[in-house]
Structure formats: structure tokens, C-alpha cells
Image: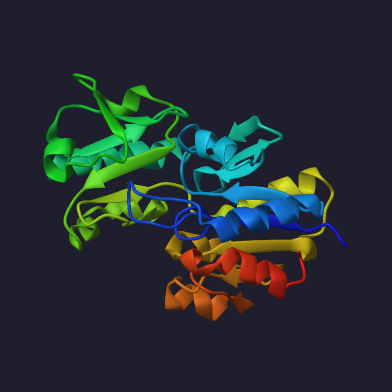
Amino acid sequence: MKKKYLFFDIDGTLVAGGYGNTYTPEETKQALLQLRENGHFLAIATGRSQAMAVDMMRDMGFSNMVSDGGNGVTIDGELLGIEPMDAEACIALLQEAEEIGFPWGFCPENMVLRLVPDDRFYEATHDIYMENRVIEGLDPADYDTFYKINIACRRGDEKRLKSLSRLPWMRFQEEYIFVEPMDKSVGIRRIVDHFGGSYSDVVVFGDHWNDMSMFSDEWTCVAMGNAIPELKAKADFVTTDVDKGGILHACRHLGLI
């Protein structure tokens, strides 16, 4: 069997369940085990920071990962590096948010917490996705690297942020937006190039908006049954839902196991 390079999104793809209550379906565990036995290369492809995803990576038996929305690469358990966002654009955006009065926070390192100048961000969002560390007098201009930015604003109000057009962003929560890299295909290509592989041997699995960028004509794309319609429209194959054996069904359909 020819070796394939498989990349899996996490939430809604590898794991099922609601926010804070996720689990890996038994059929998915079975599929991953058989894929490894057949000699395929397996990796996670996530928008999460490497620091936030590394424990889950290990717990699920992975040692390779595209993290930080495509800007981070981990191979054989070793972080090869994370490319930060454009610092000038990030500083301009955070300064604009402050002028408008939108609470904000950012990650200047590979970390599982965000820096905030006060408690306004938590008061506006009550968010528990990431811990907040209050730094009095926090000035974005004092930092050179930015990996993630969060800005609290109501849906539609982000249009007031003119600097936002210079950076990738998405709204996963009603209370705030995520400003972070969102092209997982960049990290996928870096990993395949590292091993001298062919893009035609890549298979990607996803379900949501932040997986759109990795659904490329250069390789095989699988959308979960629970995926958004727009992703299904780009897919080469639409499998069943994540909690209905979707990964296992797709891998059997593609002849990977």
C-alpha cells in the first residue's frame, strides 16, 4: 500500500461533543490504529497554538502536527518553529481596538494564555478558552511577535476596525473575534516537503470554515458529514458525521485501511 500523508482537524473531525465536553469516538480510534499499522503518515492540522494542542496531540498518539492555523510545524514531537503574524499590522489593529473601546488581548509567545491590560475582555466575554493574564500598562508596541489576537465586539462591529483587513480573522464565538493565521495548507506543504513527499499523496479531513484553506485541488479532501455546506462543496468525498464513524468510513472508502 502506498504511503499517504493524512492531516486531521481536531474539533468536529477527530473529536465529537460540545465545547469543553469532547471525546474521540471508538471508530476514530480504530481507524487511526489501522492507518498507523498500514504505514501512513498521520498529523493533526489545527488552528490552536502548539502549546494548547501538544497535550492532545500526544494523548491521541500523534507526534506530528500543523498548528497555529498553518504557521506552526511539529515533526516527531519536536516543534520546528512557528511563524508569527505581521507585527506592524498587529500593533495597528490593537491600537485601533483600544481607541474604539473594544477589549482586547494577545499572545506574544507560544503560550496557553493571553495578555490583557485589564479585566474588560473577560467581563465582555466570560471566555474560558484561554486564561487571561493582566499586565498593567500593557502596550502592544513593546512586543515584536504576535501569534494570536482576540478582540471583543458584537457581530458586525468588527467592520469598524479598518486595520483588520490586513490580517486573517474569524468569528468562532459571538462575543469576540480571533485574529490568527488560517491557512493550514502552508504547514501541510512544509511537512510534505520536509519528507520529500508528493502533494498528490496528501489526504485532509475537516469540517469547518478554518479548514477551507487546506481543501486544495492538489490533494484529496474529505469533509465530515457534520461539515458546513461550503466545505462539502469543495470536498472530493463527504463522509458520515464525526460521531457516526466518519473517519473510519472515509478511510475504508479511500482504500487506506
Residue at the location (69% across, 67% down)?
251
Give the residue at the far bottom of this rendering.
Answer: 233
> In the rendered view, does 120 fall on the left or right side of 10?
left
Q: Position of residue 148 (x, y in %)?
A: 39, 39
* Along the line of sight, the residue nearer the viewer: 162 or 213: 213
> In the rendered view, does 68 fall on the left or right side of 1?
left
* Along the line of sight, the residue nearer the viewer: 146 or 111: 111
* Along the line of sight, the residue nearer the viewer: 235 or 14: 14
Q: How many callouts does the rendering have?
A: 0
* Rendering quarter of residue 216: bottom right
Residue at the location (14% across, 30% down)?
119
* Along the line of sight, the residue nearer the viewer: 183 or 226: 226
Residue 101 seen in this snapshot: no
> In the rendered view, does 69 fall on the left or right side of 195?
left
Relative to residue 217, is residue 195 depicted above or below? Answer: above
Scheme by which the image is coloured: rainbow
Residue 191 seen in this snapshot: yes
* Rendering quarter of residue 65: top right
Q: Position of residue 241 (x, y in %)?
A: 48, 70
Which quadrant holds the C terminus?
A: bottom right
Relative to residue 134, is residue 218 depicted above or below? Answer: below
Give the residue at the far right of this rendering.
Answer: 1
Q: Position of residue 35 (x, y in %)?
A: 73, 55
Residue at the location (38% across, 25% down)?
143
> In the rendered view, does 202 fall on the left or right side of 161?
right
Which quadrant holds the N terminus?
A: bottom right
